[in-house]
Amino acid sequence: MNGKNNIAIGFLTMGFFMAYGFLLIYLRDFAPGKEEWVNSYSIGKHFETRLAHVHGNLFAFLNILVGYLLLHFRDKLKSVKAISWLALTGLLMPIGILSEVYFGLPPALVLIGAIAMTASVIWLGISFFKIKM
């Protein structure tokens, strides 16, 4: 795992959450009961689904960026595999939000994903400080 999977999975995840945005548009503009959906803008399922959509695309983009940097600097960075896996594990955060909304699961995946993504970004930042150029 040297970054290639982060790029591939990042693009696939971004595509999924972009398509999910079409569902949100449908619910806002075309679905029966759309007024109720619009009125719950900052609470409940409406708010949670928007969080998943935004964080899904953000974390997908971060995986693309992390993957690119890991590939480009793999000979100069240490712990490439661990950083790669942590970034991919970060995708559990938006997936966890959706699993809460649609399946009523507890927020464990959200916390695991958020911690993993934060750790991967910090670890990569520290690794870049340590590079001898």
Image: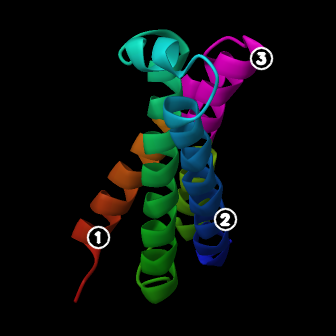
Q: Secondary structure at mark 1?
A: helix
Lower sequence index among marks 2 and 1: 2
Numbered tag placed on residue 128 in the rendering: 1
State the residue in front, 92 or 87: 92
Label 2 to label 3, Cα distance in Å?
23 Å
In the picture, measured across the screen, residue 93 lies left or right of residue 57, that is right
Q: Secondary structure at mark 3?
A: helix
Q: Amino acid at mark 3?
A: Phe
Indicate which label's residue lies in the foreground, 2 or 1.
2
Q: Which residue is mark 3?
A: 103
**Highlighted range, magenta:** 92-113
State the residue in front, 57 or 59: 57
Label 2 to label 1, Cα distance in Å?
27 Å
User: Main SS type for the magenta part?
Assistant: helix
Looking at the image, residue 14 lies above or below residue 36: below
Q: Is residue 75 visible?
A: no
Q: Which residue is mark 2?
A: 12
Residue 104 forms part of the magenta stretch: yes
Seen at 62% across and 29% down, the residue is 31
Q: Amino acid at mark 1?
A: Phe
